[in-house]
Amino acid sequence: MTTPTSVTTIERFILEQERLHPEATGDLSNLLYDICLAAKIISRNVRRAGLTDILGGSTTVNVSGDLQQKLDLIANETVRNSLQFTGRVCVLASEEDDEPVPVPANVPPGKYVVLYDPLDGSSNIDVNVSIGTIFAIHRRVTTGGPGKLADCLQAGTKLVAAGYILYGSSTMLVYTTGNGTHGFTLDPTIGEFLLSHPHIRIPEVGKYYSVNESNWNKWSPTTQRVVAAFKNGDGPLKSKNARYIGSLVADIHRNLISGGIFLYPGDTRSAQGKLRLLYEGAPLAFVVEQAGGAATDGRRRIMDIAPADLHQRTPLVIGSRSDVEFATRAMSGEVGAA
Ligand code: FDP
C-alpha cells in the first residue's frame, strides 16, 4: 500500500496483474495505459471546463437523441485518438458515434475492441456535477482487415476488461479484468493514478436506493411496488435512503463504495429504459459483479444479454447483491414485492 516513499501506481499494478498470466503479450496492459492517458486528458479538460470555452450545448444531436455538448465531443475524440494509433485495437465504438470506427488504414489492426461512453451524465457538465467515462474491452472475434460490427456485438460474459473514470471531487479510475475490482485515484501533483481502493467489495445489502422517481407514473405497477419496498421497507427488507445524482458513473460509484441499488427501469416512454447495454450496462455490470454485486435487466443477468444492436438500450437494476436479487425476483414475477 501507499507509504510516503512507496506508492502503487496503476502501471505497477497492471504489470503485477500481467505477471499472473505468463501467456500475456502486454497488449492489454498497454491498452489500459492508453485509457489512463485519455482519462488524464479528459480530467484536465473537465477541471478547466468553466475557464475555457467548452461548456454549453453544441448544435449536434447524437444517435441516441441526446444533445451533444462540446466536452462530450472533445472526450470522444480524446479516447479515439489515444487508442487508435497503437496497433492494439482493431475497432472502436462510442456512444457518441452512429457506427463503429475501424482504426485508420495505415495502422495494423490489433486484437482488441473498445466500446466507450466518453462523457456520461452530460446534462451535468454545465452545472459542475460529477460526470464519468465508461469503457469496455473485448477480444476481436473476426479475422483479417479492420474490425467490424460483429466484434462489437459481444455479450458481457466475453469482456476482457471494463471500468470507468469518475471526474468527482477527485478523479478516480475503477476497473476489472475479472480478478476483482480495483480503484485508483489521480494524484494531480504527480499526474499518476495511485492504488487507493484495492479489491473493492460492495456491501451485500445497500443503504441507498437510486432511481429517478419523477418517472413513477410511467412505471409498471411491479416497478412501483419494488421502488416502494426500497423506500418504505418490506418485511425483512429495511427502508433505504434515496440518493440520485442523475450521472450514472457517480451513482454507481457511490453505491459500489457505500452499498446501494441503482435502477433505471423500462417505462411507458421506452420499454427498454434509457441506458445502453454496450456502453453502460455491460461494463458496469462486470465492475459491480467483480466487487461482489449483481446486475440484471429485471429478469436476466446483464452480462448474459447477447446484443443485437450497437446502441441498444436495456433496463438496469444494479448494485448490492441482496437488493438486486430482491428486485429481480419481484420484477420477473416470482414473488410480490410488497
Ligand atoms: P445524461 O442524460 O445526463 O447523459 O445515460 C445518460 C444519463 O445521463 C446517465 O448518466 C444517468 O444515469 C441518466 O442518463 C439520467 O437520466 P434521467 O435524467 O432520466 O434520470
Image (cartoon, rainbow, N blue to C red):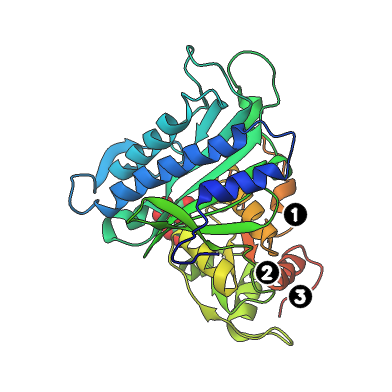
Query: In the image, is residue 216 above or below residue 55?
Result: below
| Ligand 1 - quadrant of the structure image | bottom left
Count of numbered marks: 3
Label 3 is placed on what type of residue? Answer: Gly
Asked if the residue under mark 1 is in contact with the one under mark 3, i.e. CB atoms within 8 Å, the reply is: no
Closer-to-camera residue (68/141): 141
Note whether ligand 1 is within 8 Å of mark 2: no
Q: Secondary structure beneath disc 3?
A: loop
Dot 2 or dot 3: first in sequence order is 2
Q: Secondary structure beneath disc 1?
A: loop
Spatial separation of the CA atoms under disc 3 and disc 1: 18 Å
Note whether ligand 1 is within 8 Å of mark 1: no
Tag on residue 300?
1
Front position among marks 3 and 1: 1
Residue 47, image x, y percentages: 28, 54
Query: In the image, is residue 9 above or below residue 333?
Result: above
Bin the neighbour count of mark 1 within 10 Å (Cα to Cα): few under 14, some 14-19, many 20 and up: few
Residue reaching furthest right? 334
Closer-to-camera residue (46/271): 46
Residue at (48% x, 57% y) in the render = 194
Q: Is residue 70 left or right of residue 17?
A: left
Bin the neighbour count of mark 3 within 10 Å (Cα to Cα): few under 14, some 14-19, many 20 and up: some
Q: Is residue 267 visible?
A: no
Residue 182, image x, y percentages: 59, 58
Dot 2 or dot 1: first in sequence order is 2
Label 1 is placed on what type of residue? Answer: Arg
- The residue beneath circle 3 is 336
Please state, as top left, top right, bottom left or bottom right, where the N terminus lies in the image.
bottom right
